[in-house]
Image (tube, grey):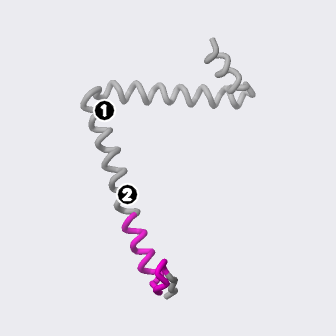
Amino acid sequence: MFTSKDKDGAATKTGEKMSQAKELLKVRLASALSQASIAQRLLSQRYGSAYLITSISLSIVSFSLSYVLISAGVDVASLLDKARGA
């Protein structure tokens, strides 16, 4: 396999570095997933299904409205600037 030199000039195998990088990626991914699941549990315990239904519905309406306006040629950026300034 290929070799490379680390900071000390010692030859190391690229395969070893790849396995270390993969292991680090797994640890970080597991950490991110655990944080996301904790947040999801807190939200579901505190607000329950009403929060999920409301937020998902508002997201669908918002994305759909944005898509329709943009596909119709409306300058959504200036529309949002006007709404923010009002």
| Residue found at x 72% / y 27% | 72
Residue 14 magenta-drawn? yes
| Residue found at x 32% / y 39% | 39
In this rendering, the answer to whether 59 lies above or below 21 is above
Task: Please count the marks in the image.
Answer: 2
Q: Secondary structure at mark 2?
A: helix
Q: Distance from label 1 to label 2 (Cα)?
A: 23 Å
Query: What amino acid does circle 2 point to?
Result: Arg
Q: Residues within 10 Å of mark 1 (few under 14, many from 20)?
A: some
| Residue found at x 56% / y 31% | 63
Q: Secondary structure at mark 1?
A: helix
First to last magenta residue range: 6-24
Q: Which residue is mark 2?
A: 28
| Residue 80 drawn at (x, y percent) | 64, 22
| Front residue of this view, candidates 20 and 5 | 5
Residue 5 magenta-drawn? no
Q: Residue furthest left?
A: 45
Q: In the rendered view, does 2 fall on the left or right side of 26?
A: right
Q: Residues within 10 Å of mark 2 (few under 14, many from 20)?
A: few
Pick the quarter of the image with the C terminus. top right
| Front residue of this view, candidates 20 and 83 | 20
Residue 85 figure quarter: top right
Q: In the rendered view, does 29 fall on the left or right side of 81?
A: left
In this rendering, the answer to whether 22 lies above or below 46 is below
Query: What amino acid does circle 1 point to?
Result: Leu
Q: Which mark is on residue 43?
A: 1
Q: Of the residues under marks 1 and 2, which one precedes in the sequence?
A: 2
| Residue 56 drawn at (x, y percent) | 43, 30
Q: Residue furthest right?
A: 73
